Image (spheres, rainbow, N blue to C red):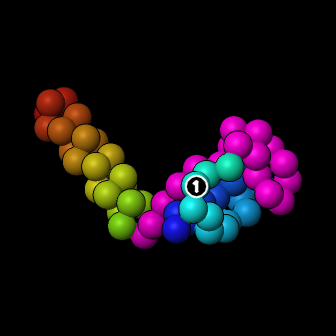
Amino acid sequence: MLDLECRSCGYKFRKDKAPARCPYCSAEGKVGLLKTAQDLLDETLGEASVMDGERKRRN
């Protein structure tokens, strides 16, 4: 089972595979994998390390 989310309306649901349309708002092509807390942390930490690298280059 996949944890999915509509990027248009925010509806969260589980299915075996991602549908072409959101089952709630019918938005086409807006359904994707739901981000876990770890995914969000990884993105944030990745952005922070990139920003740290920029600061080091400027100094």
Question: Which percent across, then down, holds residue 47?
Answer: 32, 46
Q: Quadrant of the C terminus?
A: top left
Question: Which percent across, then down, holds residue 58?
Answer: 19, 30
**What residue sits right under mark 1 in the picture?**
17
- In this rendered view, identify the residue nearer to me: 29 or 19: 19
Q: Single out the residue that lies furthest toward the right.
A: 25
Q: Is residue 29 visible?
A: yes
Q: Judge from the rendering whether residue 7 lies leftward or rightward of residue 21; answer left or right.
A: left
Q: Single out the residue that lies furthest toward the top.
A: 58
Please name the residue shown 73% across and 63% down the image: 11
Please tell me whether residue 23 is drawn above or below residue 27 in the rendered image.
below
Start and end of the magenta stretch?
A: 20-37
Magenta span contains residue 31 = yes
Magenta span contains residue 43 = no
Main secondary structure of the magenta stretch: loop
Name the image quarter holding residue 37: bottom left
- In this rendered view, identify the residue nearer to me: 24 or 39: 24
Question: Which percent across, then down, holds residue 54?
Answer: 23, 34
Q: Judge from the rendering whether residue 11 lies leftward or rightward of residue 47; answer left or right.
A: right
- In this rendered view, identify the residue nearer to me: 19 or 26: 19
Q: How many marks?
A: 1
- In this rendered view, identify the residue nearer to me: 27 or 53: 27
Callout 1 secondary element: loop
Q: Amino acid at mark 1?
A: Lys
Q: Is residue 7 visible?
A: no
Q: Judge from the rendering whether residue 26 lies leftward or rightward of residue 51; answer left or right.
A: right
Please tell me whether residue 34 is drawn above or below residue 19 in the rendered image.
below
Question: Which percent across, then down, holds residue 49?
Answer: 22, 48
